[in-house]
Amino acid sequence: MWLPLVVISFFRAGAVSPLGAVAILAFWIAWELHCWGGADAVASITLVLLWPDMHLILALLCVHVVAAFVATIVTLVRERAWKLHAIPGLPLLMLTVLLREAFIWLPISNG
């Protein structure tokens, strides 16, 4: 019953900020699929509502890729096994915000 409302809201929000709308929908789906906890999803959605820009998405991607890579390497070295990890999301989101702020202050050349 709520699905039409979500679809209509997504398309209306997508007209204003397509990147933000897709990110919010992706974070919500990650929570629904139990890939993220509720606090992680809500914090991520809040950050996208505050800063619906590519800097935040790139920072989020970079922090999570590095964390997953480091956790995987540590597990491979210590246990000689390949497994999925449950890394707390809120500290990673704090690092995401710090990295986003660093991206904002970096000079970007136009050539």
Image (cartoon, rainbow, N blue to C red):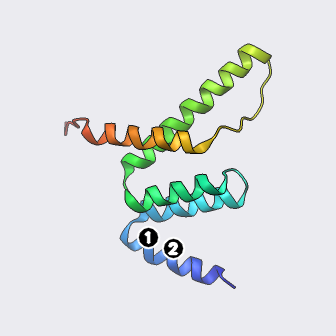
Q: Where does the image place residue 73, in percent across and percent down from the top left? A: 66, 20
Query: Residue 10: which disc?
Result: 2
Mark 2, other Cα within 10 Å: few <14 / some 14–19 / many ≥20: some
Residue 108, by quadrant, is top left
Q: Would residue 81 appear left or right of 44 to someone viewing this image?
A: right
Q: Residue at x 80, y 21 (%)?
A: 81
Q: Nearer the viewer, residue 83 or 15?
A: 83
Tag 1: amino acid: Gly
Image-quadrant location for residue 52: bottom left
Find numbered disc 1 in the image and state the secondary structure of the residue it sits on.
Answer: helix
Name the residue at 66% across, 37% down: 87
Quarter in which the C terminus is drawn: top left
Above or below, 27 against 68 in this view is below
Residue drawn at x 45%, y 55% as measured from the top left = 47
Residue at mark 1: 14
* Residue ID at (62%, 32%): 68
- Residue 86, given in percent of the width and then of the height, sits at 71, 38
Helix, strand, or loop for circle 2? helix
Q: In this view, does 60 lie above or below 48?
A: above
Q: How far from the left and from the top, in percent, is residue 92?
A: 53, 39
Percent from the top left, x then y, of residue 60?
Answer: 48, 43
Residue most extreme to the left:
110
Q: How many labels were placed on the picture?
A: 2
Confirm or deny contact between disc 1 and disc 2 (CB under 8 A).
yes
